[in-house]
Image (cartoon, helix red, strand yellow):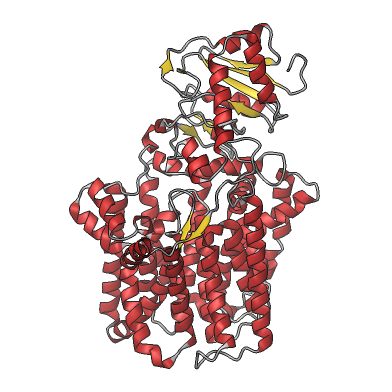
Amino acid sequence: MRLLAIPLLMVLPGAWVAFGPRRLEIPWSARLALAVVLSPLVLPAQVIGLELLGVGFSPASWAALVLNLPALVLIWRRSSRPVLAADRGEWPAILGVMAVLMAYLVFPWRWTPMRTLAWHNLMQVDVIYTLARPGPIAPEEAQMAGLPLAYPWLGHLYFAVVGWVSDVPPTLLFCAIQPALLLACVALWYLAVRGLGGSRASAVLAVGLIGLGGNLLATSWGVLEGDRSRASQIANRFGEKRTGPFLDKFYQLQVMPFGLAAYSGLVFVAVRASIERLRSLPLLIGALVLTVGLTYTTILPAAALPGGVLLLLMLLPLSKDLPGYGKGDALRLTLALAAAGLASLGFLEWITRELTAPSAQVVLSPRPLLSKLIRGTLALAVPAAPAALLLLRTARQRRAPMLVLAGTAIGSAALYAVLRLGVSNPVEYKFLFCAIIPLGVLAGLAFDGLTRRAPRASWAAVAALLLGTQAIAIHHGFRLGAHQAPHAGSGPRMVERSFWLDLDPSESDAGWTRAVRERTPPSTILVTDRTRHHPFPFAARSLLVPADRGEMTTRAGYEEAGRYNLVDLRAYPAGEFDRRLGLIDRLATESDPEALRLVLDELLALGRPLAIHFDRRGPRYEPGGGPAAPGGPPPALDWLRADGPGTLLYEDDRHAVWFIEPGEAGAP
């Protein structure tokens, strides 16, 4: 029965917004899709509100489920027979194209390590589990205890609530949530084309071009080469490798699908509002922009484009067929955009307050700008070419929907060209995902005349195109391994029987990580040198610092070394990282009691309980991360047994965990 909570919490929270307005001039199917898209905003907001009232995470999660059940009545009241009948003919095509796209997600999931350990899956689990523990509402960085998490975490809270109530671990839960978000996207893309008068075949073609058309030229070339390294090189040199295809972001555990789904909702609502007057336009645009801003802030600048272009059309005589919006409508839309934008920027400023480098820069140097323009054009070429032809053919008509789609696509591509996001490994390529959505809608409409003149042949051609591009994407991504996480095969065996992940009993770290999770307070800091696998997802206690020292075989499910991820990529203070790693070095090598007391002094200065893990067979490191010395009984453990504070929490033939409370007798 607890599994029933998953579909309920995926639909009902967002239904308050999507089905709330009595008169909303959009199809029932689109309302349902928008409910799914908006739930990652509404559900966490409800839980945070309850937590601010003093309710703990667990009761707040269950209370949110109960509080949202009346939304079933709201949906039922908006579901008259004529309303449902109007949409009935669209669902076979929507579900059919969704079935084709699902093959891309299911293909890597057949191999368990690819499902559980693909790229950054366990890094996302870190955040989800941090939010599910008792403690402050704003989470800390799970890999550097005491520092605030400088990452948009509202989507992770959504995963935490749904997973907690359903008792499903995040590594399985995303296999339900991501397809639901993708289905919502497919419905919105499809209905956008149908709302503009496109045929069903044109709408299915548009969905295929959005889902599979990204970087298709370079991907196809790479497949012909037949070599993994060569294919990867081509995909990045003659396009943007990380945009091929759009679906690549949905087979992994991450929060980017929340942002892309909300962006799809923005494009749909803006297109619909350019066809007929929407009374609830400010509510929908504001809620969708806020969803992007709080769940995936990276693409927030692009989220302003659909509503912003529509606002320009309201204020300036650029279109011949825009519905009759007045100055009051323009003012309300302006206020909605401003409020959502300011709230999102305020959230971003709050969570990044500890970082040491700016997260965004404008780059107008000719050479990098030209390089990006060429690569971006090649990455978007397949949907962009027919879209451009359609815009040229209809330019004199100055149709409002075409202007909205064109302005959104051009603006998103321009953001990719001129912005640099991130200190290292820039991520502005994600704006190309925003550009491909309106381009795909336009491309589908470009073929509408052909699909109407020869419907049977068109359906055959569309089906062949979908299956062909799907085969290319799967072969490139997984047969050649261009999108395959390189260290997934070296990761741990896991048990996924409840919300909390466990290591398989055959793993040597299973016993001590479980003991730390079940027998220490949630605020405990885990102090450990390099372990075979990163321990947080199984111990669920924040680390002092990751001590992998660049050894990537210990980072399956992360695919980034600890220092690179925290310091180089995310701009946490390098000095603090090195200081903490130095404490671990000294704890592993010092034998002098006074020196060990000084180390404990610094560790306990954080004011939190400590769980110090010792591995009798693990390598020892010289201070500063020098060459490994032979393993052996750690001197610090012998000192703690003899004279140190705290108690032995766990011990087996290899591992020992020593637990110390800050105020314990004998503590420094």
Q: Residue at x 58, y 72 (%)?
A: 31
Residue 136 is drawn in which quadrant? top right
- Name of the residue lying farthest toward the left: 225
In depth, the one of 287 and 318 nearer the eye is 318
Residue 1 visible in this rendered orientation of the protein: no
The image shows residue 250 at horizontal and vertical percentages of: 45, 55
Work out which residue is located at the far front of the displayed protein and give it: 365
The reply to whether residue 480 is visible in this rendering is yes
Quarter of the C terminus within the rendering? top right
The residue nearer to you, when weighing 368 against 471, is 368
Count how many numbered circles sit on residues in the image.
0
Q: Which percent across, then down, holds residue 305?
A: 53, 73
380 to 254, vertically: above or below? below
Residue 36 in the image, given as x and y percentages of width and height: 57, 63
Image quadrant of residue 236? bottom left
Residue 248 rendering spot, x and y as whole percentages: 40, 55
Residue located 45% across and 60% down the image: 430
Q: Farthest residue in the top direction?
A: 642
Q: Identify the residue shown where x is 57% and y is 38%.
A: 498
Residue 246 vs 409, above or below: the answer is above
Q: Is residue 645 left or right of residue 311?
A: right
**Which residue shows up at 62% across the image and 74% down it?**
79
Tell me if 35 is positioned left or right of 630 in this view: right
Please identify the residue farthest to the right as the structure is shown: 53
- Height in image: 566 above or below 27? above
